[in-house]
Image: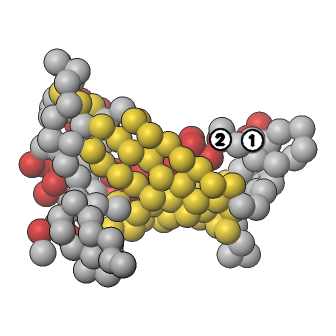
Amino acid sequence: MTNKNDAGKTAAEHPVVRYVNQVRVRYNDTDRMSFVYHANYAMYFEVSRLEMLRARGLTYKKMEEEGGVMLPVSDLHIKYIHPAFYDDVLDVEVTLLEKPSVRVRFGYRVTNQDGVLICTGEVVLACVDAKTRRPTRAPEYFLKCFPEFDR
């Protein structure tokens, strides 16, 4: 069975938009068991997603003030596989999973410096008009930052 995405392409035909951001685990990121506290992975996802967008010329501030669009989180899923610890350096790989429309889907894969898979996740953002707070399509300037989807 083949899964088709919103653009009608199979996963193999879909462009890959990836970015890797390194995060060092701070002492205050850990819990009493010395593991990274589970909710901090959502923060690592956000920081890495923002760096991916910044590398493409986008910032939330610019999108809200100049573009009139906000991107609140509408869905978040994290699968925890192995703990990370204080002072670990984590590679947070962010993948744009499909061409942005009214929603923007990002996948995540977090590994430590030994290549051990720590967790995977997915975040769905809603494109929302900053004035009306109603759903809207991703603006053209946003789509132009991901030319991989023009193919």
Residue 95 falls left or right of residue 98: right
Up-down relation of residue 43 to residue 2 (above or below) = above
Query: Is 93 in front, or is 122?
Result: 122
Q: Residue 14, which numbered label?
A: none
Q: Which residue is mark 1?
A: 37
Residue 51 position in % (x across, y down): 42, 52
Q: Residue visible at 83% across and 39% down? A: 31
Q: Residue at x 44, y 47 (%)?
A: 123
For the question of whether residue 15 can be seen, the reply is no
Kindly give the residue lying farthest to the bottom in the view shown.
12
Res 7 → quadrant: bottom left
Q: Position of residue 79 (x, y in %)?
A: 63, 55
Residue type highlighted by circle 1: Tyr
Say which amino acid is labelled 2: Asn
- For the N terminus, the quadrant is bottom left
Q: Quadrant of residue 129?
A: top left
CA distance separating discs 1 and 2 = 6 Å
Question: Residue reaching furthest right?
Answer: 33
Looking at the image, can residue 36 be seen?
yes
Residue 49 % position (x, y): 43, 50
- Where is residue 100 drawn, in percent x and y? 23, 52
Q: Residues within 10 Å of mark 1 (few under 14, many from 20)?
A: some
Residue at position x 79%, y 42% from top? 30
Circle number at residue 40 = 2
Q: Are marks 1 and 2 in contact (CB under 8 Å)?
A: yes
User: Which one is in front, 110 or 25?
Assistant: 110
Mark 1, secondary structure of its residue: loop
Q: Residues within 10 Å of mark 2 (few under 14, many from 20)?
A: few
Q: Is residue 118 left or right of residue 31?
A: left
